[in-house]
Amino acid sequence: MDSHRLTPISFSHPAAPPQATLAATPAGLPRAAPALPLLSARLRLQYQPLPGRWVLLCPDDLVQLNDSAAQILRRCDGRHTVAGIVSELETLFDTQGITAQVQALIDEGASRGWLD
């Protein structure tokens, strides 16, 4: 990864059908992204040396992440706000204007049930 840029977020795993991935509220509406994103206890974020990628280990699946997605999800620890994650990554990578990219991954993670 270029140490001065975040790469666009992408997943190498196709999305499952919506009924299998949406975390729903009792009313059946998609769950809003949490104020303090926390990776679900059912999942584990892990670096695999071969092939040199971060993966999200799910109970029945494995999702390969690009470096940017991994950097964002590594900060979903229940202590960082989205603004805090953005600030930390903008400082780390000496960049600006990544709020939409971070928010998009947080929203996607919430809709897939990756975040509590």
Image (spheres, grey):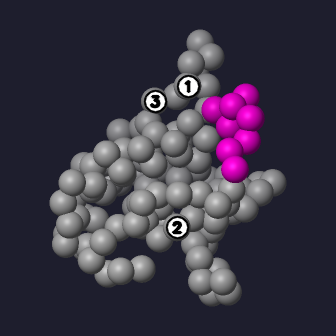
Q: Viewed as shown, does residue 87 lie left or right of 13? A: left
User: In the displayed image of the protein, which residue is found farthest to the right?
Assistant: 60
Label 1 or label 2, whichever lies nearer to me, is 2
Q: Residue at x 25, y 73 (%)?
A: 92
Q: Secondary structure at mark 2?
A: loop
Q: Are the residues tagged 1 and 2 within 8 Å (C-beta)?
A: no
From the viewer's perspective, is residue 8 above or below residue 78?
A: below
Q: Viewed as shown, does residue 62 lie left or right of 44? A: right
Q: Which residue is mark 1?
A: 30
Q: Secondary structure at mark 3?
A: loop
Q: Which residue is mark 3?
A: 32
**Residue 51: x %, y % from top left:** 66, 83
From the viewer's perspective, is residue 20 above or below residue 89?
A: above
The boundaries of the magenta stretch are: 14-22
Looking at the picture, which amino acid does disc 3 mark? Ala
Q: Residues within 10 Å of mark 2 (few under 14, many from 20)?
A: some
**Residue 15: x %, y % from top left:** 68, 45
Q: Are the residues tagged 3 and 1 within 8 Å (C-beta)?
A: yes
Q: Secondary structure at mark 1?
A: loop
Q: Residue at x 68, y 56 (%)?
A: 13
